[in-house]
Amino acid sequence: MTQDKQTVTLKNANILDAAAGALLGEHNVFIEGGIIREISTGPVTEGDKVLELNGRTLMPGLCDGHVHVVAATASFPDLMRWSPMYVTARAGQILSGMLSRGFTTVRDCGGADFGIAQAVAEGYLIGPRVLFAGHAISQTGGHGDMRDKNEDVDSCTCCAGLGRIADGVPEVRRACREEIRKGADFIKIMASGGVASPTDRISSTQFALDEVTAAVEEAEAAETYVAAHVYTARAANRVLECGVRSIEHGNLIDDSTMDLLLEKDAFLVPTMSTHAVLATEGVAGGMPQQMCDKVHEIVDAGRITHAHAHSRGVKMVFGTDLLGPMHRHQLLEFKIRSEFQTPAEVIRSATTTAAELFQMTGEVGVVAVDAHADLIALQGNPLEDIEILQDPDRYLDLVMKGGNLFKERL
């Protein structure tokens, strides 16, 4: 089921330049083979399909830098027991929801594999382009180890659910090489405790430095990078020194971490929406109460920390990390970020800055010649009112990914 790559012309589109944070005025855009081929204020090639935008805002499709598309429940032990075919069916619903909100590229930080990415690319699943880490790599007893205290090693496969367990440098190297062999776009490691794991503390550090270094070396050998789940400054600083490229969450980092993020030209991917929603909906979504209770210590801290990181010029990428039925809150991240970022800054975090982290600068996150035709069209100007992006039923009139139309009500 290959998707239709008909030629398309978009007429009189008011292009939003995400890098500049400005509207460029009305242009005509010609798309062929899923790629933007021409942009002009004058005539362009007329495609098989011609769409009149009548001055609507045309902007890059949105990027979410931290998702789990197979996490159809917030109960990871349940997820590990589900049929893989059932998980994929549920993932399809999550993916289509993301695309309907205007997200055309997402970075899956644990759980999705080459099969889901391929099914989306070929049109068998409807959703955004999926960049995937495969299984997130965790030490025994780390954030990716979902065994309860009464489960021994024989009752847990090495590779189940969102994560896989690896201890020691040889096992970490092997785990990284296995995920890269299976097509992973990047490597994800669990470098501190977390909310959803049953046997660790948020304040713990995980993996020895030589294990982290081994993961970074394997990723760099494959011309990619490592993303690390961390919360505290202590955990973040040690992995940044080893060469990790992106810090996921980071609610409890401090100025020393921000110094390193700036020095290393690394990225921070806050996931503020999931922490806000877990506090109120986590139990209903399948997460045990004792795990949801852990989120309270990081919600308020994150709002202060991330605002400060932004003020210091740290590169921040839009991410959500939502689970189960809470995926419907994906656009809440815009509202939370707008407390300390301008609309232009939040939009950049979900377009050009995300593309830089993804190593896809010029391919996604821009309306430009030779970029993927991943585009959304809106009524109104989100640079003046970010709430426009938060109400797709009212304002989102067009969603295109790779030149294929998934929503059109012009």
Image (cartoon, rainbow, N blue to C red):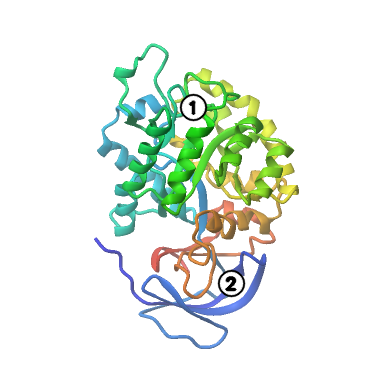
From the viewer's perspective, is residue 332 above or below residue 28? above
Image mark for residue 344: none
Task: Tell me the distance, in whole angstroms, between the alpha carbons under discs 2 and 1.
Answer: 41 Å
Residue in the foreground of this view, choosing between 32 and 144: 144
Q: Does residue 266 appear left or right of residue 103 in this picture?
A: right
- Determine the residue located farthest toward the top in the rendered image: 150
The percent coordinates of residue 268 (x first, y second) are 61, 45
Q: Is residue 306 visible?
A: no
The percent coordinates of residue 196 (x first, y second) are 49, 27
- Label located before the other in sequence (2 or 1): 2
Q: Quadrant of the N terminus?
A: bottom left
The amino acid beneath tag 1 is Ala
* Mark count: 2
Residue in the foreground of this view, choosing between 66 and 400: 66
Image mark for residue 196: 1
Q: Which residue is painted at 43% across and 23% down in the image?
A: 140
The percent coordinates of residue 179 (x first, y second) are 36, 43
Badge 2 crowding class, 10 Å Cα cut-off, few under 14, some 14 to 19, many 20 or more, is many
From the viewer's perspective, is residue 251 above or below residue 317? above
The percent coordinates of residue 132 (x first, y second) are 41, 47
Label 1 element class: loop
Q: Which residue is painted at 65% across and 43% down in the image?
A: 336
> Which residue has dot 2 on it?
15
Q: Is residue 259 visible?
A: yes
The amino acid beneath tag 2 is Ile
Q: Does residue 260 appear left or right of residue 41 in this picture?
A: right
Label 2 element class: strand
Q: Which residue is painted at 60% across and 41% down in the image?
A: 240
